[in-house]
Image (cartoon, rainbow, N blue to C red):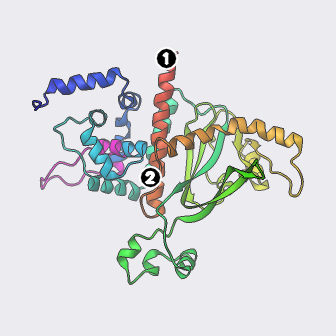
């Protein structure tokens, strides 16, 4: 049987992790999480300590744990367990093996308090300001797009669906079943996502569209072309039309270039007028004319735009792949918190990568 773990054993193990390039250590070196303290305290002021009681956990520590959750697509329970279990996660949170770790309920209450105080947008803006101050200005134009984020599917009757579409709340629809009402998401919506696939017909492979029903929300983002940092974001239900969101705060006025790239869903006369008035140059894809083949010049122009616009797909691939972004909660307020934290976690990791690239050159 091995002996008790000593201080130098932990120190040596952490030293080994550092030599192997612990990404969380690099993230902590890049992002000074103390910069969020003022916003966190403003959102969740400390209670009256005159009556004593157990000291509260540090707000920055709890925020770090929410970032770890967003980076890895975990539940709050899994986040608590892994902070206790992994030395690299402990070090990132500023904890030692003998320190207490906030439990899942504490993290839930902390996140709920941030939602109630409407603090997440301010935290996102503070991070963006720090990234800009580090030298990564929004440059070379901006790329706008949206991605679906799945939420727990609902099983409702036609009558219940009609009431949801009419705007009734869960408490109103299931007034005699309060426990059931708490588990019903009346903010999320169904939509159909079309995906390309190859099907064999008569021995020849042909590309066809496959309709995939999806229930949940949408993450609308605007990234800068140069650094691929999310500069603006918006969360809606999955059925919201992408094009109409362009005029709802997705344009970054601080970008050093005027160009705006987006797919054909954003092409409309209203959006073109809006961009012109804002002093922006539209690089939005043009649609294929109805009943006619795509003109060669339009097809080539769209292909050129796609080479730039495809950068935003890398952002979504990161969030849905390694980060495992999904919605586990009920309601758009909590979904907005989950997606905003995921956008912040992506930006922090991107900042770390940009710093690493600069250091290696």
**Residue drawn 43% across the image and 64% down it:** 330
The label number, if any, that marks residue 338 in the structure image: 2
Residue 231 visible? The answer is: no
Q: Secondary structure at mark 2?
A: helix
**Residue 45, position in %: x, y?**
29, 51
**Residue 180, position in %: x, y?**
39, 75
Q: Earlier in the sequence, mark 2 or mark 1?
A: 2
Separation (CA) of disc 2 from disc 1: 33 Å
**Residue drawn 51% across the image and 27% down it:** 354
Q: Nearer the viewer, residue 13 or 351?
A: 13
Could you say which quadrant of the image residue 167 lies in?
bottom right
Asked if marks 2 and 1 touch (Cβ < 8 Å), the reply is no
> Which quarter of the rendering shows the N terminus?
top left
Residue bearing the label numbered 1: 360
Magenta span main SS: loop
Q: Which residues are magenta?
A: 42-66
Answer above or below: position of 68 versus 291: above
Answer above or below: position of 137 versus 176: above
Answer above or below: position of 104 versus 317: below
**Residue drawn 57% across the image and 79% down it:** 162
Q: Secondary structure at mark 1?
A: helix
């Amino acid at each position: 049987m091995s002996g008790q773990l000593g201080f130098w054993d932990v120190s040596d193990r952490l030293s080994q992790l550092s030599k192997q390039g612990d990404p969380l250590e690099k993230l902590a070196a890049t992002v000074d999480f103390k910069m969020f303290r003022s916003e966190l305290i403003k959102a969740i002021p400390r209670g009256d300590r005159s009556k004593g009681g157990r000291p509260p956990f540090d707000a920055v520590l709890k925020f770090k744990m929410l970032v770890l959750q967003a980076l890895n697509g975990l539940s709050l329970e899994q986040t608590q367990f892994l902070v206790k279990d992994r030395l690299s996660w402990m070090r990132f949170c500023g904890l030692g093996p003998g320190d207490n770790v906030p439990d899942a309920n504490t993290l839930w209450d902390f996140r709920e308090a941030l939602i109630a105080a409407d603090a997440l947008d301010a935290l996102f803006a503070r991070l963006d300001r720090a990234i800009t101050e580090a030298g990564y200005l929004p440059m070379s134009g901006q790329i706008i797009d949206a991605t679906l984020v799945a939420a727990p599917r609902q099983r409702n009757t036609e009558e219940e669906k009609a009431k949801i579409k009419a705007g009734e709340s869960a408490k109103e629809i299931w007034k005699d079943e309060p426990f059931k009402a708490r588990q019903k998401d009346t903010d999320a919506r169904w939509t159909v996502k079309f995906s390309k696939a190859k099907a064999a017909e008569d021995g020849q492979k042909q590309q066809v569209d496959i309709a995939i029903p999806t229930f949940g929300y949408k993450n609308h983002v605007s990234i800068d072309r140069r650094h691929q940092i999310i500069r603006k974001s918006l969360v809606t239900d999955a059925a919201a039309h992408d094009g109409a969101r362009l005029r709802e705060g997705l344009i970054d006025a601080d970008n050093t270039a005027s160009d705006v790239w987006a797919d054909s869903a954003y092409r409309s006369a209203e959006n073109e007028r809006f961009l012109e008035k804002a002093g922006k140059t539209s690089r939005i894809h043009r649609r294929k004319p109805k009943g006619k083949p795509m003109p060669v010049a339009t097809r080539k122009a769209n292909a050129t735009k796609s080479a730039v616009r495809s950068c935003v797909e890398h952002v979504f691939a990161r969030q849905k792949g390694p980060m495992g972004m999904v919605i586990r909660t009920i309601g758009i307020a909590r979904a907005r918190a989950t997606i905003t934290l995921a956008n912040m976690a992506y930006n922090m990791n991107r900042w770390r990568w940009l710093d690493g690239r600069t250091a290696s050159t």
